[in-house]
Image: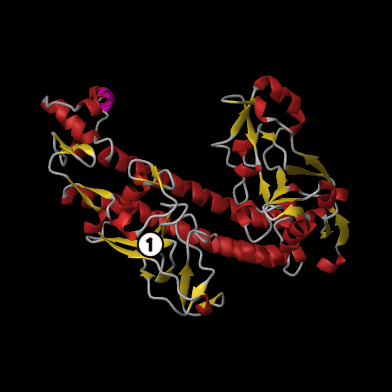
Amino acid sequence: MGSEWKKTSLGEVAILRNGAGVKQEFFSEHGVPLARVSDFTIDSINISDCKYVDQEHARKWQSHLIAEGDVIVATVGSWPPNWSSVVGKVIRAPSEAVGAIQNQNTCCILPKAECLNNRFLFYRLKMDDFVWYAANGAGGSANQARLPVKKLAGFPFPLPPLPVQIAIAHILGTLDDKIELNRRMNATLEGMAQALFKSWFVDFDPVIDNALVAGNPIPEELAERAEVRRKVLADGTANREAAKQFPAVFQLTEEMGWIPEGWEVKPVAEQVHLTMGQSPSSDYYNKDGHGLPFHQGVTNYGERFPKHKQYSTGGNRYAEEGDILFSVRAPVGRINISDCRIIIGRGLSALRHKKNYQGFLVYFLKHVFQKEDSIGSGTIFNAVNKKEMESIPYLVPTDGLAKAFNNIANSLDEKISRDAEQTQTLTNLRDTLLPKLISGELRIPEAEKLTDEALK
């Protein structure tokens, strides 16, 4: 089937638009967002931390504004296997990036609608043959390879008829849409848990509420938050039932300043079992599934669970199922959860709460390391050793409160885990279908059946 498709090149079926050449002197604190290669994610754009272009200067680049679904290729970057910034990386613009300026070192590929479907184009350029075409066509240094747009336009590929393109894009797009929905739902659930943790164990909202109701003094450091809580108490939205579990007085500690009375601050080593990774000899490594999954660092981290791509038949440092995987080398503080027994290398540590309050421990670590590569008061670390890990100040609330939060976090995390498991299944199916559909090896009805079964 695929052998019957017409051979073409990218330049024949699409218009290639170079990125804008916005100079730094026109950057601004506000204005029109500027989408750079550094804002690319695996397959999208995240402009939450982007640069902005002065409104006046932005008018010059009206022809370079991004539309939803635009397929954009990075024309400058590194060569494989440094996939995070690889030249030829392909993304599809999300709704959040609409109206942003497409900056230099990128090429937006605008299909000719009569012969090329936009979403099919995105999936077609995700194929290995394009990845290697882009890498081999790029020149320059290892970290600054450049792919000429003329070379990009010459990418040759067989093009299915438009109805077949649309059907392929629909199948793969349906899987991706569900994967994205799961991601958003999980982000919402995790945000709920983080917000509750912050309210109870960072801002101490219930303790402030109790102190205000009882007429107890509020420490000066918490006065601003107390004003917020006065309004919440006045309008009746404070959770007074939950607050019954909390004290109404604060105490001063050397490590964390003011904390609720009866709570403690202890080194994390007293509360958790900590295993620091140690890498086995590379002689034991394999990609065939022999032994146990092996993770050296964050390279194969997923949204929540790591993706197992490398294995080892040797090693003596393990993370058990449910253990928190904490990166101890840059980026310090990135977290995943182990979904099975794995071998951990020098870039990771494994943590398990001694009372199995894993939910509490997860969100405590996420709060302390909300800025990666920092520890404690914000000191920057490229790596942390066992002694530094063990000495992290750990807030210990009453056992009842730690358990109460842990139960709430666990109920949310169970839903997150189910969605994450489905997402991995759908991702595997998409990655299996992609080359088979694009090559014509698998027919549309067969792929539709597999997709429908996976989404039930």
Q: Main secondary structure of the magenta part?
A: helix
Does any portion of residue 269 appear in the rendered image?
yes
Does any portion of residue 115 appear in the rendered image?
no
Point out residue 137 in the picture as x, y percentages from the top left corner: 80, 56
Q: Is residue 64 magenta?
A: no
Picture quadrant where residue 15 is located: top right
Q: Is residue 16 above or below residue 179?
A: above
Side (left or right) of 49 relative to 416? right
Point out residue 415 in the picture as x, y percentages from the top left corner: 39, 54
Point out residue 413 in the picture as x, y percentages from the top left corner: 37, 54
Q: Is residue 291 above or below residue 70?
A: below
Side (left or right) of 44 relative to 6? left
Name the foreground residue: 446 vs 197. Answer: 197
The residue lying at 75 percent from left, 25 percent from top is: 60
Picture quadrant where residue 348 is located: bottom left
Point out residue 228 in the picture as x, y percentages from the top left corner: 28, 25
Side (left or right) of 8 relative to 186? right
Residue picked out by circle 1: 349
Q: Residues within 10 Å of mark 1 (few under 14, many from 20)?
A: many
Residues in magenta, as a range: 224-229
The three-letter code of the residue at mark 1 reads Ser
Q: Quadrant of the N terminus?
A: bottom right
